[in-house]
Image (cartoon, grey):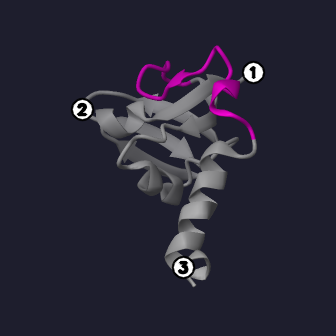
């Protein structure tokens, strides 16, 4: 049966990670994308843009809802720390990650 295939389970799991049980409009109004966020500021991932082709890749890297991330630098790529790992993302990928500032 198609609903029980591993591919379908992966799609459903990804959808739950991206959106949880809340509606799309429930994103905080202060959310911004990772590319436009300030360097050195602690951030929390509030979502990944659903329409992006790379949404699955970002989720596999660990950019799921409520993950804490810190942007270290920007230039040709956005360098950030996520769960103890340094990750470099290009402008397009970083723009697909929606974040919210954490109060220090």
Q: Which of the two residues, 5 or 43, is positioned nearer the viewer here?
A: 5
Mark 3, other Cα within 10 Å: few <14 / some 14–19 / many ≥20: few
Spatial separation of the CA atoms under disc 2 and disc 3: 42 Å
Q: Residues within 10 Å of mark 1 (few under 14, many from 20)?
A: few
In terms of depth relative to the viewer, which is nearer, 9 or 43?
A: 9
For this orientation, the residue located farthest to the top is: 30
User: Which of the numbered marks, if any, corresponds to residue 45?
Assistant: none
Q: Quadrant of the N terminus?
A: bottom right
Residue 2's disc is: 3
Please tell me which residue is depicted at 36% across the width and 40% down the height of the picture: 93
Of marks 1 and 3, which one's residue comes earlier in the chain? 3
Residue at numbered disc 2:
76
| Tag 2 secondary structure | loop
Q: Which residues are magenta?
A: 22-40
Q: Give the quarter of the image for residue 66.
A: top right
- How far is mark 1 from mark 3, CA to CA? 47 Å
Determine if the magenta segment contains residue 31: yes
Query: Which is nearer the N-term, disc 2 or disc 3?
Result: 3
Q: Residue at x 55, y 47 (%)?
A: 63
Where residue 69 appears, as percent x and y from the top left, is 59, 38
Q: Residue at x 48, y 41 (%)?
A: 50
Q: Work out whether residue 9 can be spotted.
A: yes
Residue 11 shown left or right of residue 29 in the figure = left
Q: Position of residue 2 (x, y in %)?
A: 54, 79
Res 83 seen here: no
Badge nearest the viewer, 2 or 3: 3
Q: Residue furthest left?
A: 76
Tag shown at residue 104: 1
Provide residue 83's location: percent of width, then percent of height. Answer: 62, 51
5 vs 61: above or below: below
Q: Which residue is found at the position 53% from the left and 43% from the top?
A: 81
């Amino acid at each position: 049966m198609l609903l029980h295939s591993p591919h379908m389970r992966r799609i459903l799991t990804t959808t739950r990670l991206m959106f949880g049980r809340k509606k799309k409009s429930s994103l905080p109004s202060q959310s911004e994308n990772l590319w436009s966020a300030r360097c050195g500021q602690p951030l929390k991932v509030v979502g990944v843009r659903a329409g992006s082709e790379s949404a699955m890749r970002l989720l596999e890297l660990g950019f799921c809802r409520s993950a804490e991330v810190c942007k270290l630098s920007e230039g040709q790529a956005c360098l950030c720390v996520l769960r103890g790992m340094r990750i470099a993302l290009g402008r397009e990928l970083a723009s697909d990650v929606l974040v919210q500032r954490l109060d220090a």
